[in-house]
Image: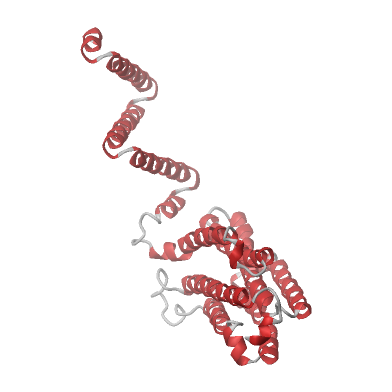
Amino acid sequence: MVSAVTATYGFCCYCYIWFLLLLLHMVSAVTATYGFCCYCYIWFLLLLLHMVSAVTATYGFCCYCYIWFLLLLLHMVSAVTATYGFCCYCYIWSPIALFKSFSRVVESHTETYCCLFFLCLGIMYMFRSNMYFAAPFQEKVVIGIFFIGAILCLSFSWLFHTVYCHSEGVSRVFSKLDYSGIAFLIMGSFVPWLYYSFYCSPNPRLIYLVVVCILGVSAIIVSQCDFFAKPQYRGVRAGVFVGLGLSGVVPTLHFVITEGLPRATTMGQMGWLLLMATLYISGACIYAARIPERFFPGKCDIWFHSHQLFHVLVVAGAFVHFHGVSNLQAFRYAAGAGCEEDNAL
């Protein structure tokens, strides 16, 4: 039969027939050794291989890669299920069941997608042409610090919500990273605003930057204590980060008094700064007060509870702040690198 096939269809088909016979022999050996279940599993893989080959021939190599990516995800999910149990399996599949598990999407995957967005946006900003900056190196550094703070905050939050169900020890470690990420975001948000607002006043700018860094590092140190993550200290956690954010009131008043309100609302982008602060503080207060679940017990356990609202408001605040920083950079570019031109604005 093989000789007839070779004469009729050529050597390639001959090799293909021998490959199938070899696979059949392997499947038979596996069946004899490990039983009928493993036999069915082998045939299932062969069926998948055949389907992937058909898809490749019909739709091209990209669809082939996509199919293999899905198979790789299936294998990873199977491994996770065998290792960590069904709960972690359900969590891995939650992005696929997007509309069936809105709670998981809002709590974790919002951070995942936004983290990737800020990462891509930061890379694009760093490779932006120097002709759009008054002082390219300094401006890219200070704006890059904001991107680093946002990426660390979102990535730490995503990691915590991914692995906190693993064990108590893992949950404790990653909860500390999660709290530290909030402090990094707040400190990173201060840096570009202080740089641009006090561009021509280096001494106050340095003082405010040092104070913010000291307060931020202090918040990180406090968040490493085990008691900080306990439920009874929920209000304390919110208070620490709200206090860190409110430390910006002093430089804000300083800028308004020295430069005037019209200049603060134009070149200083005070409106966007206040909106960002409102979003951050509102999120922290909602988280601490457990709104709205405290008013509707049992009604917000899955959707729209305080933790979800806190996440959404923090992400919204980061986007608002980036918009304000972009406007600050545009005003500085229009004014030039010197300070003499600022007096004409």
Q: Quadrant of residue 262?
A: bottom right
Residue 79, horizontal then vertical, whole percent: 46, 41
Given residues 262 and 191, the one toward you in this image is 262
At a point 40% along the width and 42% down the height, the residue shown is 69
Q: How many marks?
A: 0
Residue 12, horizontal then vertical, whole percent: 30, 17
Q: Quadrant of residue 265?
A: bottom right
Vertical comparison of 253 with 298: above or below: below
Q: Quadrant of residue 217?
A: bottom right
Does any portion of residue 244 appear in the rendered image?
A: yes
At a point 23% along the width and 9% down the height, the residue shown is 7
Residue 318, horizontal then vertical, whole percent: 54, 71
Horizontal side, residue 297 vs residue 328: left or right: left
Horizontal side, residue 124 vs residue 42: left or right: right
Which part of the image, by quadrant, shows the C terminus? bottom right
Given residues 78 and 84, the one toward you in this image is 78
Horizontal side, residue 201 vs residue 299: left or right: right
At a point 42% along the width and 77% down the height, the residue shown is 297
Vertical comparison of 196 with 13: above or below: below
At a point 51% along the width and 58% down the height, the residue shown is 116
Which part of the image, by quadrant, shows the N terminus? top left
